[in-house]
Image (spheres, rainbow, N blue to C red):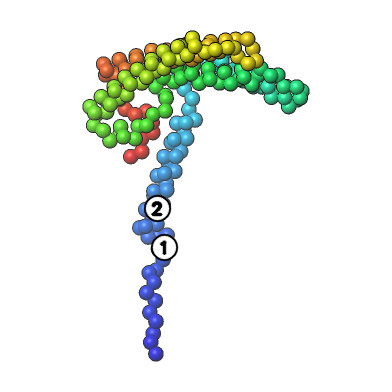
Amino acid sequence: MSVMHNTQAPALRPGTDHATGSEDLQQEMDVLFEQWQEEEAKVDLSDLRWTDALVFAIFWILFGVVFLQFFTRYVLNNSLGWTEEIARYLLILVTFVGSITAMRKGSHIAVEALLVYLPREARHWTLVAVDGLVALFCGAMAWYAYQLGALAPGYMVSIDIPKGYMYWAVAGALAGITVHATLRFLRRLRRQEDDAPHGLTID
């Protein structure tokens, strides 16, 4: 009669090194997530300028138009026809005019993962090239938007305003973005701009 031996490895108990390593990793990830939440919760309004007032004005006008659309449609059952189109145009303006502030503050979304691994000098010249390309791209888009405004036919559907005005407003916003992008490029070229990634670095 043969005896069956149990060859199955014993289960790891909470006190083993593997379990401890997993718990440590989980705690580190929790700390990093809390740090990220704290960074995202901070809204720095200390560096706002009077030029940023335009995007706030457009935003609150957009809020009023959308509220008016909601109120007339669902409360009065008699929706105003112009609110939907005007809200769409105001949303476009908030995006582009707000991008001027984002460019000035350097808070546009950017992929910075590879910058962490580059040497200091390579990182600097990579960012110089990126800033230069951004300035050229935004300048070209401003010019094309201006040309589209001159060629845009007709008027808006709900109100008698030429559609070209919308393109020209976007062109003006892109011109403002180009100015700040060019200033950032010049500061970076003179090493007056910090080359460190502004995002949360995970070691």
Amino acid at pointer 1: Arg
Q: Which of marks 1 and 2 is nearer the N terminus?
A: 1
Q: Is residue 59 above or below residue 9?
A: above
Tell me the number on the disc at residue 25: none
* Helix, strand or loop under label 1: loop
104 horizontally vs 189: left or right? right
160 horizontally vs 127: left or right? right
Residue 189, quarter of picture: top left
Residue 108 seen: yes
Kindly identify which residue carries mark 2: 22
Q: Position of residue 181 (x, y in %)?
A: 37, 17
Q: Is residue 9 above or below residue 132?
A: below
Which image quarter is the C terminus in? Answer: top left
Q: Where is residue 167 in the image (x, y as percent from the top left)?
A: 50, 14
Q: Where is residue 91 in the image (x, y as percent from the top left)?
A: 56, 21
Residue 52 seen: no
Q: Residue at x 72, y 22 (%)?
A: 79
Amino acid at pointer 2: Ser
Kindly identify which residue carries mark 1: 13
